Every structure is written in C-alpha cells, then in structure tokens.
Amino acid sequence: MEYQELYESWLNDDFFDKETREELLSIKGDYDEVRDRFYKNLEFGTAGLRGKIGAGTNRMNKYTVALASQGLASTIKSAGQEAMEKGVIISYDVRYFSKEFAEIAAGVLAANKIKVYLSDDIRPTPVLAYGIRYYNTQSGIMVTASHNPKEYNGYKVYWNEGSQILDDVAEEIITNIEEIGSFKNIDIMPIGDALVQGYVEYIGNELDEAYFKDILSLSINDNNIDKLINIAYSPLNGTGNYYVKEILKRRGFTNVHFVEEQEKPDPEFSTVGYPNPEDPQAFKYLEKLGEKYYSDILIATDPDADRLAIEVLDENFEYKFINGNKLGILLVNYILSQRYDKGDLPENSIITRSIVTGNMVDAIAKKYGVKTELALTGFKNICSKVSEYENTKEKNWIFGFEESIGYSYGTFVRDKDGISTAMMVTEMVGYYKNQGKTLLDVLAELYDEFGYYNDKSRAIVLDGIEGQNRINRIMEDFRNSSLEKVGDLKLENKIDYLYDETGIPKSNVLIFEYSDNSWFALRPSGTEPKLKLYIYAKGKDKESSDFKIKELDKAIIEKIQKVM
C-alpha cells in the first residue's frame, strides 16, 4: 500500500483513537509530512525502536509499540513456558508517553500470559539492565530515546544475559512482527486486570538497593582520596537525579551541588534543549553553578542516565570539557593502574572498545598486561563480550567504552552506566586531588608517556528520505574512491566492515588508516538521521596532531560536499 493510501486508512478507520485521527487530519494536504510518516514502518533494529513521537507507521505511538511488544511476546513464547514464567522487566524514562508506552507493552505481554515486572516510577536504563539479572527475567524493555531531542522516544529490548538483544533475537522479533499483519490482531490486557490476575507486578525500592550495593563494590580507593572535592551535578531533567545523589552520598562525597532548574523530570528539556551531555552546550547551567562554588568537577548525565560527561577546571580557572575518548583514557588508566598496584588485576584481563573509539587505551592497557579488543558501535556489542567470557572463562572482562560518553565497569550491569561512572569519576578526581593533581595534569602525563593522541568528531544531520539517500551516496562514494593522500599522510589500509572479513559482525562502517598513526571512520548513525565522522591522529605534541586532524577534516568534508 502506498503512503497516501496508508494515511487515508488510518485517518478514516475508527479503530484508531480520536486523538490519532485528529492529529492526522491536521496534516492533510502536507504531502511531505504525510510521506515521512507513512513511507515505511518504523524499523525494529538490533536496539529496538527509536523515532519521532506521532501518528503514522514511521512514528513512535501506541500502535507501533503494541506491534513491537507482540513481536517480542511471540519470540518469548517460542522459547517455552519457562521463558514466559521468567517474564520481562519494563522501565521508562521522563519523555512524553514513556509511562503509557511501558504500560501498553506490559498489557500486550500480559495478554500473552507472560509475567511482567513493571517499574513503579521512572528509572535509569542501567537500573533496568541490572534488573534483568536481579529478577532472572527472559527479557527487558526500556522505554527511552536516550539523548535524542524531545520529539523522540524509543523502545530498547534486552535479553536474559542482561545486555541488549543481538541480531539473532532481533531477527526473530522482526519476523514475528511481520506475521502479525494488522494492529487489530493484537490483544492488550488493561493494567488493572493484569495486576489482579498476577501477570503484572510492580517493582520498587528493593531493586535500587541491590543496585547501589553492587555499584559500591566497584570502589578501588577510599582512605587515600579527598572526599571533600567540590562537585556540581545535573541530570539534565532526566532520570539520574536520585541515583547519582544517592550513590555519591553513600560513597562519602558530601560537598555536592545540584542544578536546581534541571533536577526535576521535564519531557520538554526546557532548560537544555538538546539533552546530550556529549555537547558542551549542555553544561551552561552547570558552569554557572560551578563558578559559584569553585567546583573541581562538573558532571552531567543524559535523560536515561546511561551516558555521562564532565568538565574540570584548567590552569586559567575556566571549565574544560573532557570528551568521551579522553575520559575513557583516564578511567582505563585509573582502574588498571590502581588494581595493578594492589595486585587485584586478574590474569587474562581484557577491555573492549568500539571500532570508532580512539586507540590510546590499547597502549595503556598493554603497559599493565591487559589486552584490548574491538566491537561494533553500541553497548549491545561491547557488553555481549561479558556473557561470552562468563561462559568460556578464557578472559576476565574489566571495562568497556565508546567515544560517545558510554562506559561500563564491572559485569553486573551489561550496558553503559552513567551512575557507576559518576561514582568512579568522582573517586578518580578525589584520588588525584589528594596527590595535588587534576585530571588535566594526569592527561598531560599520559601524553608525555604514550604520545599525543588527538581526536575530532562530527555529526552531519541529514533528515528525512532525501537525507537517508544522501548518507547512502556518501558512504558509497567513500567506499568506491578513497582519499589516497592527504598532505603528507598516505593511505595504508581501508577496512570495510560491511564487506570485509574482520572477525566481527557486518556493519556499514568504513575506516581509513594512514601513515603516522592517523585514521578516520565514517558510519551512519543507527538511532538518528546523522552521518558520523571520527578523525584520529597521533603526534609528538598537541600542535602536530592538531595539524594532521585539520588536514584530514578539510579533505573529508570537501569530498562529502561534492557528493551531497
């Protein structure tokens, strides 16, 4: 059925609720908007669903959520009665319709006689991921769009290992979704009935308490750290407020200040706009608070509190943003060096980084006898290694991260975790301050020892159908005609993760490796209408590495613009 016919069928069918049909009536005659909402179904990928909220097949709404939930229910039922009894844990963040979507998912699962543990309030994504193993469920659902703008929501699916579903489970869910046919074929049990019949059970504080206990067990140093460091924190109007406050308090850090305007949940994200702490602009309120109290560190978590970024004071008493690669370098160095010194670093230890994350950590890990390995972007891939090594016992997984401010330490949360990271970053700052150092001092020492690794990233936003077509054209252009020479840098190797045999699953990612330890990567975002560009260079100092990055950046952008 063509998009216009689909639009008319939704508009005129009494099956769809009054609000949905009124919304669709308001765009009648706007053919571009109609096409964007109905030209395809919102795709269920390996991370689930993510899209703009609204009426239409290519939108997040009660119908697309019900469809995905029935696909998941059929997958669980095919796994047998035990899987149905183990059930699904569901939580949600602060976004528009998050609670409603969570209850719809619960109602669909209950109608399929599948047990549901439903969060009694908003909770961070890492708590949901932790809850899968705590309750020993078959699956988990987190209703969140993470750091996307307010117009978005999403639906992340996890499996019984506690990490996000991989391709095999996703493909089974997709097949089941395709077999459902009409939304009219989906049954939804009212939450009240599901509670009475025992299919739905609310979860509360006992999950949080278990989570806090395990997070606290990650601590490495205690008596030799400065617990009076001045901390400023913002949850950016998301789910992290209670959890970061509580873990820092229990850890003994009491000199903490909070951005009052950003403490309470706000689906509009009215104080920040784009609630992504990866963007230094998100620190505007934090910097004002930090300047008021002379804070040593500013910490921000994204709306579902699985990602974290920081700023620290530099020698000019100005706040300096530390990007995802640099914070990953600092955390890896701190964890490995401290555990090595204490004799607490297991044999055959390993850390995992994504293929588009900087490689300075490889040199740091090697110093402590720890190996690094690569995984595709996304913590579904990074944390799948935890379950693999848990089964084989051949490695001891220590840490995983990616440049987009996602970090995971320990094995009980098998996803990125902004709460545990907040605690570890705070401990790290307190440890180094006790030695008279800042994180910038430590970075400078690492650069002196290992060389100056530098990086730059870009996100080229290309919305809609034409935007997706442009992204495809750019990827094919780079795939077919490489930049062989950029200044003095010569191309030495190209890796095409879609077609080359790399030892990891296929993905539409291109990496170009140049002489002198320089390289760049291109990949379409899996969750947003963006083309991601990552540029890396190593030099003897900042100036030399900056020069290489500028040359590469200029050449790449010029080539992209010719294709666009």
Image: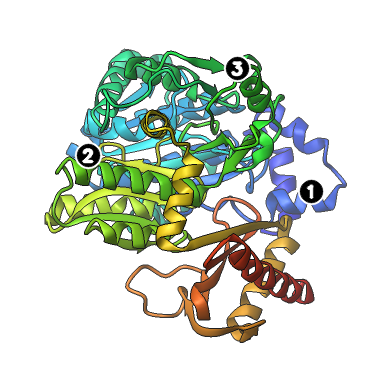
Query: Which mark, by number, is residue 83?
Result: 2
Residue 166 at least partly seen: no
Residue wearing tag 3:
293
Cα gap from disc 1 to disc 2, whole angstroms: 41 Å
Q: Quadrant of the N terminus?
A: bottom right
Amino acid, disc 1: Glu
Name the one closer to the observer, 84 or 260. 260
Kindly report which numbered mark, 3 or 2, lies closer to the viewer in this rendering: 3
- Please tell me whether residue 229 is drawn above or below residue 141 in the rendered image: above
Residue wearing tag 1:
33
Name the one closer to the observer, 419 or 553. 553
Disc 3, SS: helix
Cα gap from disc 3 to disc 2, whole angstroms: 52 Å
How does the figure colour the protein chain or chains? Answer: rainbow
Amino acid, disc 3: Tyr
Q: Residue furthest front?
A: 436
Q: Position of residue 9 (x, y in %)?
A: 70, 45
Name the one closer to the observer, 332 or 37. 332
The 10 Å Cα crowd at callout 3, few under 14, some 14 to 19, many 20 or more, is some
Amino acid, disc 2: Ala
